[in-house]
Amino acid sequence: MRPVHIALAVLVTALWGVNFVVIEVGLDHFPPLLFCALRFLVAALPAVFLVGPPRVAWRWILGVGLALGVAKFGLLFIGMHEGMPAGLSSLVLQIQAVFTALFAAVVLGERPGRRRLLGMAVALAGIAVAAVDEGTSGPLIGFVLVVAAAAFWGVSNVLTRKAAPPDALNFMVWVSLVPVLPLLGLSLMFEGARPDLDALSRLDWAGVGAIVYVAWVTTVFGFGVWGFLLRTYDASTVAPFSLLVPVFGMSSAALVLGEGISAPRWLAAALLVGGVALTSLPRLRLRRVWRVWRGARRRPDAPEVGARSDALGAGARPCAPGVDPRSDVPGAGARPGAPV
């Protein structure tokens, strides 16, 4: 990747990490479902009039809008409102990679290999450590709600892959329009009209800033830049940067909100990030590298790997025994890995 694009990827993950601190600020000003509805309302308007018509079928927009906007973000905001720390929320949400792999296996028929299964087990171990730590230091209900939010994020990921939108920003803006009315209805039903009206009547610059940040900065700008990077580079090149989100989330929560990071939480972070990396990142073709190295060791007079022999017609072999003869052509015979 070009240095400017690396900087953009790191910037977006930093903005997404800090987003959890901003959500805490917003929850001090609004009931969680109302705050979530305002986030998507501001993200969709006026952008929906600027990005052009939807480029995928409406069923995918409605499905992702309900799974991502209503279920995932609704549960996340309620979980944080119930006491789930911002930094820990940014970490636990990464379990979405495991849910995505599981749902993709059921819906898309993608069979996870041994490395991916190992990654799931490691990530789930991290969740278990985090659950024990949170259960002894805070309300467990918030933790459960954020895990449920990660599960619905996995659902939305599978739906998005089925939709295959050609323009990520266009898709995200139209998806943002879907949750507004359902979230407002749920807010009136469960939070009440009076608390909603009181929150809107006491609106101040901090509340406005929180809405603008979660709507325009993290949604419109963040997904717009991320979509540009995915159109420019392979997904396997861009996706690893998302592992920086909990790093920025936990560090910004510690600096701004004074959240402590206990030893069990550090262990949970290491297990979760490591498990998600094993689950999501492309598989290194270590077996092929080993076979090439072993063949070169057995045949000291073998030509350099990747070099063409002038004696091909005389029975010379262009590469080590057992190695695909196309392996000296970049990308030949290889499956381009992509994160789930």
Image (spheres, grey):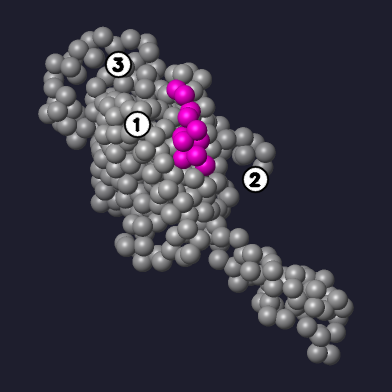
Please give the name of the residue rendered at 67% of the width and 38% of the height, measured from the top-left corner. Answer: 3
Q: Is residue 202 visible?
A: yes
- Please state which amino acid type lies under the numbered disc 3: His
Q: Which residue is mark 3?
A: 29
Q: Is residue 268 left or right of residue 76?
A: right
Q: Which residues are magenta?
A: 259-270
257 within the magenta span: no
- Mark 2 and mark 3 residues within 8 Å of each other at the beta carbon: no
For discs 1 and 2, the disc positioned in front in the rendered view: 1
Q: Is residue 15 left or right of residue 299?
A: left
- Dot label at residue 1: 2
**Residue 101 rendering spot, x and y as whole percentages:** 40, 56
Q: Considering only order in the chain, which callout, 3 or 2, is on the residue closer to the N terminus? A: 2
Q: CA distance from mark 1 to mark 3?
A: 28 Å
Q: Dot 1 surroundings within 10 Å: few (below 14), some, or many (20 or more)?
A: few
- Secondary structure of the residue carrying tag 1 is helix
> Which residue position is annotated with label 1?
136
